[in-house]
Image (spheres, rainbow, N blue to C red):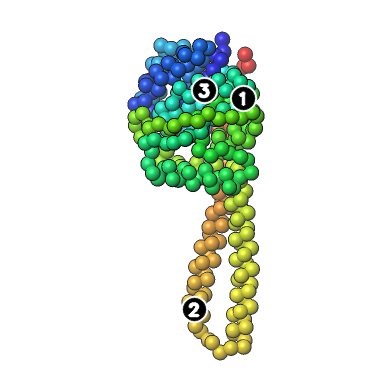
Amino acid sequence: MKARYSVVVPMYNEEEVIQHTYERLKKVMDECGDSYELVFVNDGSRDRTAEIIRGISSRDANVKLVDFSRNFGHQVAITAGMDYAEGQAVVVIDADLQDPPEVILQMIAKWKEGYEVVYAKRLKRHGETLFKKVTAKLFYRLLSSMTSVEIPTDTGDFRLIDRKVCDVLRGLKEKNRYVRGLVSWVGFRQTMVEYVREERFAGETKYPLKKMVRFALDGITSFSHKPLKIASYVGFFLAFSSFLYLFFILFQKLFTTWAVPGWTSIVGVNLLFNGIVLMLLGVIGEYIGRIYDESKDRPLYIVRETRGYEDGEYINKREGIRNER
Ligand code: UDP
Ligand code: MG
């Protein structure tokens, strides 16, 4: 029988928190009184994450495991979780208990009122570095100033979506996935609950600066053409001013006797313009790289094994090979 609620938990090297996360989630979900499943997606962890989940899943039939062949990234892990989730409502939550599982009950209440997307807005963030808080804040402001899709600020991927929304999201084929943006983009009746983001229960963040930058670039380039526009404005402005400058130097050459002292300005202008041109090429390169990714049409992720599903029935789910039940 299909569970009514699915809770998707992406995990990357989370051996220290799993047991605890499982117990907290189980407690909350038992309280809600309906059938549920916990879909743990192991995103190519190098520690004992998969092993521990396998153990839990052999004791608790509500627990399922989707084990990736390598690390594909947080957003892809969430996507896989949505692919495998069977519930009428699907909740995505981080493994580290920074998002309190108890909030799920509030989300379910809103869902029962008829909302199709319930996202959780962070009122405060506890136990995160100042750097993370500031960059996150700036990023969400920057993103919202650049896109026409209204992506709520200060919300992560902690949210509940209805089956309908989940199916629509699964149909979106893009590879550079910025899930929270996609959820906003699809529309439907959306509402929010507020919560305070807690400290990580154990272990450390799995989002080093490199992944944060990648994530930010995905968010901006998937939802905005502004950087390209800015690139062309800057280019246009530069071309125009160099044209003016050309007149100036021609005038200088023909009608005045101020000779060689042009060296500084030539080098200066050269450096400045070359720098800007390279920067703009970089912006264009970001987009072209993403077009390339999309055109390759490789699967988004590769599953090594699943637990809790009959006979690997769900393997290659995204490719549409499985049988519909
Ligand atoms: N995560 C993942 N793959 C990755 C990085 C992170 O599945 O490549 C998971 C991680 O296990 C956690 C969630 O994504 O459940 C959020 O990561 P984390 O808590 O480290 O990020 P932060 O809260 O510091 O932004
Ligand atoms: Mg965290």
Q: Which quadrant would residue 207 be assigned to in this image?
A: top left
126 horizontally vs 160: left or right: left
Measured as percent of width and height from the top left, residue 94 is found at 45, 29
Q: For mark 1, what is the residue?
A: 115
What is the secondary structure assignment of the residue under circle 3? Answer: helix
Q: For mark 3, what is the residue?
A: 106
Cα separation between marks 1 and 3: 12 Å
Q: For mark 2, what is the residue?
A: 263
25 above or below 272?
above
Q: Which mark is residue 283?
A: none
Identity, as a three-letter code, of the amino acid under mark 2 = Trp
What is the secondary structure assignment of the residue under circle 1? Answer: loop
316 above or below 276?
above
Label 2 neighbour load within 10 Å: few <14, some 14-19, many 20+: few
Measured as percent of width and height from the top left, residue 255 is found at 62, 88
Q: Is mark 3 within 8 Å of ligand 2?
A: no
